[in-house]
Amino acid sequence: MDAAEFRRRGKEMVDYVADYLEKIEERPVYPDLEPGYLRDLIPTEAPCEPESFEDLMQDVERVIMPGITHWHSPNFFAYFPAASSYPAMLADMLCGAIGCIGFSWAASPACTELETVMLDWLGKMLQLPECFIAGTHGHGGGVIQSTASEATLMSLLAARCKAVRRVQAVESERSESDVLSKLVAYTSDQAHSSVERAALIGAVMMRKVPTDEHFAVREEMLKKMVEEDKAAGLIPFYFCATLGTTPSCAFDHITKLGPLCESTENMWMHIDAAYAGSAFICPEFRPLLNGIEYADSFNFNPHKWLLINFDCSTMWVKKRTDIIGHWQIPLGRRFRSLKMWFVFRLYGLKGLQAHIRKQVALAKEFESLVQADNRFEICAEVILGLVCFRLKGSNELNQNLLKRITKSREIHLVPCQLSGRFVLRFAICARTTESRHIQRAWRHITQLAFELLQEQSESNKNKKILSLICVKSFLISSIWCLITKSCFSPEFYYAS
Amino acid sequence: MDAAEFRRRGKEMVDYVADYLEKIEERPVYPDLEPGYLRDLIPTEAPCEPESFEDLMQDVERVIMPGITHWHSPNFFAYFPAASSYPAMLADMLCGAIGCIGFSWAASPACTELETVMLDWLGKMLQLPECFIAGTHGHGGGVIQSTASEATLMSLLAARCKAVRRVQAVESERSESDVLSKLVAYTSDQAHSSVERAALIGAVMMRKVPTDEHFAVREEMLKKMVEEDKAAGLIPFYFCATLGTTPSCAFDHITKLGPLCESTENMWMHIDAAYAGSAFICPEFRPLLNGIEYADSFNFNPHKWLLINFDCSTMWVKKRTDIIGHWQIPLGRRFRSLKMWFVFRLYGLKGLQAHIRKQVALAKEFESLVQADNRFEICAEVILGLVCFRLKGSNELNQNLLKRITKSREIHLVPCQLSGRFVLRFAICARTTESRHIQRAWRHITQLAFELLQEQSESNKNKKILSLICVKSFLISSIWCLITKSCFSPEFYYAS
């Protein structure tokens, strides 16, 4: 394909993309197929000769689209949002064309430099303390990671390195492997699985801190564990706080946890605000980030909620020297700051704030609908764009409700566990979700719930009748037993 | 920006991209600016109100382009190629629009399934042993990683986990931290820095195996180290072989190293063929991969040399169960297999082979030019698309030559160290590099070399004259000394 054909096909693709996103509501949000569906639809080997672009695009509709979970459908309420915006897509096109691999300054100075400045721009939008801003003289600064998992791992590795050095500075005879075997990290029992995984990779212990009734870590809980561990000869070195947990968007109490970490031999505090972080650009949500001044590192995902397409996970550290050699796992990197630049300039701070506020308002709207229906209950405080709710009743009942929702393919949700209860998560995801989608989703959920409850009540009636029959037959057989005096025969027990 | 504006701006961007790539030769390949250039060119904060697309695109030319190292210029011969093709760019546009986060099958079945099948397609192109192909029943299979660094880390972690389990199965009383402290991994002294870094992250020892005169690891070298380490109570568990090293594209002897690993308590053998791997789709280069049957895992970067834009690093394992829980560091992932599908179908295997062969031929052409000039020497066998060469003479001479090349900004090269010698690396990189670019690059290099050698010879002449003057003055002063008998006074020595 030469440049001339790319001009033609590229413009066709622009239209395909615009069509796809404009008409996405017409597609079922969740696919209806069995694992392994795709293998039978395409050849077992790559073609030897080139094929035509038309054939390929036909196969996009035939093979790919039926297997897509449409994350940008306004009927998608699962997981957390995956950011998507036209400005970010335009930037990605430019990024692909420049195609530099930014592993060093010389490999493309603009790539390194724009990233540093964009992280400063974003840091200022969040009102991060000055120490996190690179500026022209700062000791801190930001870097783009692929995902929050990577940022967590990087912070844990930096903390591990620092802890080993600190211990060995005092006890020079201690071997590195001895120190490593005593290091202990902490995180919430609500934290994302990637936090535990970072500790596995880094070969250090990690302990889960139990949370309070709001699913948040409190100072006294962490303090107790740290003291126990120190008494047992362990070395607490790292705490990963979460602002906006995955299950319920809970917030750990960092204003209290921060000072505790500081007084515990400068235990490294990393803050994972993967989802919630984007909201901190709004002054009304910024107090949720209070305590950030105690953190050694902080991360959130603009690729979740700040209209910058995946992947763009932004991480700041207080002291750049702490993570030299640990900036990232992959050496190569795309020119991802272009997406930030395009989105920030084409939306402006106000446009981004409007996006966050609109989505929080939609979540509040959904919360009101749930609250107005006394068959349902809200399971966690609705602070941002996530509503955790359930039918009053058993876990099984709620599992059945979710099964019906999934099967209907009109909207898509995923569940979570909160204090052993099966809960439905309703996250405002797509940029194009409007009030009418919320209202329709709620009508759909209540309709399915109505059917489920009715069937259950039918079945309960039947069960009652059945149990009446059982009691009756038990009585008859008991009487018969008394008569025949074979009441304790094994056969009786088997039969009843 | 709504869909209508995206249609317009998207098409403008397609033209911008095509223009950029068609006229890339007109731009200096390497930027001429000082670190920190960008910060002064843009505001210190994000705008509050949205800006216009026109202003943004003007700033792309004003701010970004002057700071780009143009990796896709046909005059770029640095590092290794970064793949780029129009079909991959089209696929990336589609990937951005679908914007699914493929962390599980349900999150987008097509994303998981196309990846598995594309890795099978590519595995078959490389004639990987059946055990690496997922097929419908296989135990092995492939996965896309972001970079080779990540693949190496994943394989090392899987090997670490397996080794700990293996030792503890026999000696159940041994603690995990004790086993970890005894594990030792190996790699070539020519291996990429990311291999050593993987060991640092995984908190295990790593030893560098010295290479032979062709910069390759031989069986006897590894064997000796393994035996020494075992005798010292260590536990060899992992060897990372390199096919196509970064400095000189050397190949470790895996046909012999493989059986050695197998007989050393099944030491995990990972093969890193980041650059060279793409060439194995050509039957004439496939013998370089012989011995793959001994590997536990294998990785290469189609994003280097197989026309699939960064990032797309493909990794295969013999037993999927070995890396369950270790498939990757980031949990989220883009729909990267779309790029593979587009490129494989729109080029066909033959088109891809033609690309590899053309670039190897260009390297051979450059090699001939170097060989025909007796001022220069070839420093490593030219097997694929990389030529290591230098001016016969000192390291300083070659450093000066490279400085002049870099300063001229007509072509771009980077150096390497081979056995302590400063060597210039000439890698065929851009898809659009043709014979005329090779010829012109060589003329440019020889012209700069001519100037340098001439200046040096001038300076040598001057030095000779100077030294004659010195000798003369020494003689005079010596005579004078003899006369004055102050020959051994300290002043004399200081003066001479």
Image (spheres, coloured by chain):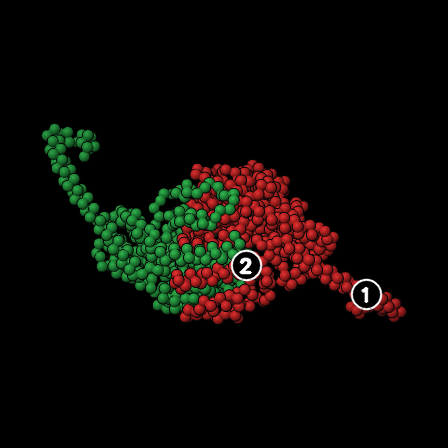
Chain colours: A red, B green
Q: Position of residue B229 (x, y in %)?
A: 42, 53
Q: Residues within 10 Å of mark 1 (few under 14, many from 20)?
A: few
Residue A229 on image: x %, y %: 58, 43
Residue B389 x/y as whole percent: 28, 55
Specify whether B186 is left or right of A445: left
Q: Secondary structure at mark 1?
A: helix
> For the residues tagged 2 and 1, is the chain the same?
yes
For disc 2, the marked residue is A21
Which residue corresponds to the image point at 52% horizontal and 70% vertical from the top-left? A41
**Residue that mark 1 sits on:** A465
- Crowding around mark 2 (Cα neighbors within 10 Å: few <14, some 14 to 19, many 20+) is some
Question: Is residue A288 positioned above or below A475 on the image?
Answer: above
Spatial separation of the CA atoms under disc 2 and disc 1: 53 Å
Residue at 50 percent of width and 55 percent of height: B5
B27 or B314: which is nearer to us?
B27
Label 1 amino acid? Ile
